[in-house]
Image: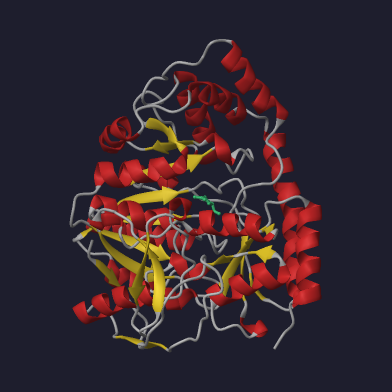
Amino acid sequence: MQSQCIWTPFKVLTPLSFKPSSTFFTFSFSKQLLLPSKSIAAVSSARRAISSYPSLMASSPAGKDVVSTQNNSNQKTQQPLQHVAKRLEKFKTTIFTQMSSLAIKHGAINLGQGFPNFDGPEFVKEAAIQAIKDGKNQYARGYGVPDLSSAIAERFKKDTGLVVDPEKEITVTSGCTEAIAATMLGLINPGDEVILFAPFYDSYEATLSMAGAKIKCITLRPPDFSVPIDELKSAITQDTRAVLINTPHNPTGKMFTREELSTIASLCIENDVLVFTDEVYDKLAFEMDHISMASLPGMYERTVTLNSLGKTFSLTGWKIGWAIAPLHLTWGVRQAHSFLTFATSTPMQWAAAVALRAPESYYVELKRDYMAKKEILVEGLKAVGFKIFPSSGTYFVVVDHTPFGLENDVAFCEYLIKEVGVVAIPTSVFYLNPEDGKNLVRFTFCKDEGTLRAAVDRMKEKLKRK
Ligand code: GLN
């Protein structure tokens, strides 16, 4: 994959004196200079910087196949001997897997990976049990159990006013992650240019790499992570195949405003560009109303809307997702889906249909509960001394960790796990240029109130401003 990033002016990565203190934290770091915007030099420097940014490296499976290698600074490090195709060789074990393993290993409170530590609603679980008992246990129709396709179409109409054909325009997948992969693999050709907004959810870059796409990246910057309109205008051209957006946005909690969406929409129409929109946090919109890109004038025809059950129903392990797109785009998505997973768990699809027909009161309550959790975490983090960036949606909040004197996000997260007993997610993994995320870490509030308070108490006690 070739990558290209629209860089801010010069970035100098200075050497850091990280001492790997466990097998989970081995890395090397060397001085790199990144040149400005769009040159090949910038691209290759960026790549070098990425490979040398400190990372939390997972151990090899079962501790086997470990070899010694020499890094840039002539130190011997343990490197797993792994075999992986070029399209995936730059990607490590996902940060979520790494951080959740570390949470268990160190007995730390996990405010890292975004999964609730409470259960989904009884009526949905009952529906799954009933479906299993009713013998709904063989392969589902490849693109989705008809009843679920209808429930998705009904929900989409309520949310956006758009009427879609459940038979022809909806594809049920194994979580939104598969819907993302099927969209990229089904609609992107090798060499196609796709625009991402950094920070971005890790699977976007990996699946685009599998599809052989050329990534162009626009960075959303704190404090409000708003879209830099002028950069966007020069980035979207006739050569662009697609723009990928995520609203509400993981990890920042930013929600794309109507103005931002309209600008993206008109640039996409003008240049005949597709939009892939990940809206899995649409029901966790707290500070403003969620707007679906597909509902903007002229956009349905060029948009793939991606969503899932997991976040809205606190059932992240069920892995039920979907893609909604006009027939001409659904064809590609379905072709990829057919050969990735073919079909998704049958009884869970039946139960998902019941879930999506929940009364509006369910969504109101969900939002109310999450607002209370958010308040506990945000107020707690403020009291601890973090600088907080306002989060409008999702169950995440991003903070600036620099008041505590650690050199970057990875070092901070390592300290937080080992010395404080709390897990957060370093955000540098969500950028093409990891330096852009070095001051930021992400906390989640999808945990019960006792857990959130306990995490805040640990931080109040042990985290001191420098
Ligand atoms: N979406 C979840 C998060 O951002 C992680 C899902 C995963 O582990 N792949 O925390």
Q: Residue at x 52, y 46 (%)?
A: 280
Residue 324 shows in this picture: yes
Q: Locate residue 439: give its quadrant.
A: bottom right
Residue 451 location in percent, x, y?
77, 55
Residue 93 location in percent, x, y?
44, 56
User: Looking at the figure, which quarter contains the N terminus?
Assistant: bottom left
Residue 226 shows in this picture: no
Q: Residue at x 34, y 26 (%)?
A: 168
Against 464, residue 398 (above or below) is: above
User: Looking at the figure, which quarter contains the C terminus?
Assistant: bottom right
Extreme top residue here?
134
Against 217, residue 286 (above or below) is: above
Count the marks: how many? 0
Left or right of residue 441: residue 13: left
Residue 446 location in percent, x, y?
67, 51
Left or right of residue 406: residue 326: left
**Colouring method of the image:** secondary structure
Q: Residue at x 35, y 47 (%)?
A: 299
**Which of these two is toward me, 49 or 179?**
49
Left or right of residue 346: residue 300: left
**Which of these two is toward me, 414 or 394?**
414
Against 294, residue 170 (above or below) is: above
Q: Residue at x 44, y 35 (%)?
A: 174
Residue 157 location in percent, x, y?
50, 33
**Which of these two is toward me, 224 or 15?**
15
Q: Locate residue 80: give its quadrant.
A: bottom left
Left or right of residue 411: residue 366: right
